[in-house]
Image (cartoon, rainbow, N blue to C red):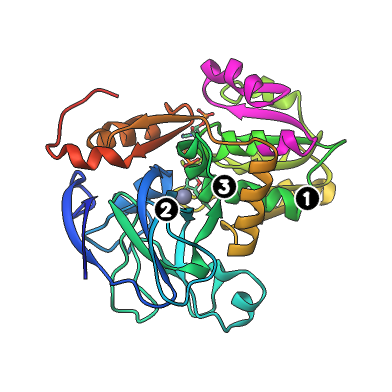
Amino acid sequence: MLQTQGYATHSATANLEPFSFERRDVSARDILIEILFCGVCHSDIHQARDEWGGSIYPMVPGHEIVGRVAHVGAEVTKFKEGDVAGVGCFVDSCRECANCAEGFEQFCLKQSAQTYNSTEMDRKTPTFGGYSSQIVVDENYALKISDTENLAGVAPLLCAGITTYSPLKRFNVGAGQKIGVVGLGGLGHMGVKLAASMGAQVTVFSTSPSKEQDAKKLGAHDFVVTKNPENMMAHAGTYDFILDTVSANHDLNVYLNLLKRGGVMVIVGVPEKAAEVSAFSLIVNNRTLAGSGIGGIAETQEMLDYCAENNITSDVEMISIQQIEQAYERTVKGDVRYRFVIDMKSLKNGVNQKVKV
Ligand code: NAP
Ligand code: ZN
């Protein structure tokens, strides 16, 4: 077994703290990744705090992992030592069901093994995520990443990138379309960059007036402060597509009413409580309300290649692992520009310093 250092939380109300645990030895089809950077997704916070129920402790969060391959098993063909590799939201699946066969491993009919807060496919061995020094993963569930100077900016693509790319592709977002992104956080800012790169005209709907300049720099053409109902009414019935990335409870009907005839709104944010949708919000203009969950391995690789070709990375605020609690607090307040990424070298600093982010 491989002795591994990380940060874990032991309950819904505890802080993250240093944690030692074992990872499996590298078997024939596995690679060992020395983790360089791990993004901080709002899903880490929801799960660490058990906001979705059923959390498993101790929990080492983190599913936006980028690192260097330190060792490969005897039968590995996709990676060699020294390559850069990534791991996203899941580390295994049954590989046989209809969904796995069609590249939707995230919806494995036997339930994929999530990167953390889950078990391996043996349904016994707990999985631990990327707030740690290293990870062992089957090569088929690791992503190939081109070696760039900004690997910290690549890490958030493994969740925030694919979660926004996948619905944009599925609904053919592109030139000539007016689209909205609701919530300018980790997912939202990737949604803006990706949709703008695909040629769409993008509006950001935000509760934070201070993000307007940034939104325009990220590629948005328009910025609407959602706290003022008059601002919203002015846009009624004009959007082809809306991507809702908001992590907290909010009124979906307000956004559905912005869709024009045949328009589609996709939910990717996962607030704690269920939303209420009025039938009229959907009936008028023949609207569609849809959802989207991360992406399969092939589509995640397609997204990484697309981002490399188009020079798209995440805008990150780098933190040390010792700053994780402050980063969580700021994320919950919507105060992140636009993804916290942990520099995993900081694990070696040891003591839990109190540092202001
Ligand atoms: P994030 O960085 O915290 O961004 C969420 C944004 O939502 C905030 O920056 C804020 O933007 C807005 N917001 C926050 N509270 C709000 C409120 N009370 N009312 C209205 N807007 C509010 O979070 P993230 O990492 O992007 O994740 C977003 C959500 O997606 C989370 O629920 C996460 O669990 C979920 N998620 C889903 C998938 C999937 O596969 N579907 C994958 C990853 C994450 P403004 O300041 O601009 O208003
Ligand atoms: Zn995530």
**Alpha-carbon distance for marks 2 and 1?**
33 Å
CB of mark 2 within 8 Å of CB of mark 1? no
Inspect this view and state whether residue 278 appears.
no
Q: Which mark is residue 287?
A: 1
Mark nearer the viewer, 1 or 3: 3
Residue under the image location 39 percent in, 45 percent down: 38
Residue furthest out toward the left: 351
Residue at image mark 2: 63
Cβ at disc 3 under 8 Å from ligand 2: no
Instruction: Confirm whether the magenta stretch covers residue 273.
Output: no
Instruction: Confirm whether the magenta stretch covers residue 212.
Output: yes
Q: At which x and y percent is residue 222? A: 71, 22
Q: Which mark is residue 146?
A: 3
Q: Earlier in the sequence, mark 1 or mark 3?
A: 3
Residue under the image location 69 percent in, 26 percent down: 220
Amino acid type indicated by mark 1: Arg
Amino acid type indicated by mark 2: His
Q: At which x and y percent is residue 240? A: 80, 41
Mark nearer the viewer, 2 or 3: 3
Q: Does residue 165 lie above or below 217 as drawn?
A: below
Amino acid type indicated by mark 3: Ser
Q: Secondary structure at mark 2?
A: loop
Q: Earlier in the sequence, mark 2 or mark 3?
A: 2
Residue 191 horizontal side relative to residue 7, left or right: right
Mark nearer the viewer, 2 or 1: 2
Position of the C terminus by quadrant: top left
CB of mark 1 within 8 Å of CB of mark 3? no
**Alpha-carbon distance for marks 1 and 3?**
40 Å
Q: What stretch of residues is rendered in magenta?
A: 194-223
Relative depth, front residue between 233 and 40: 40
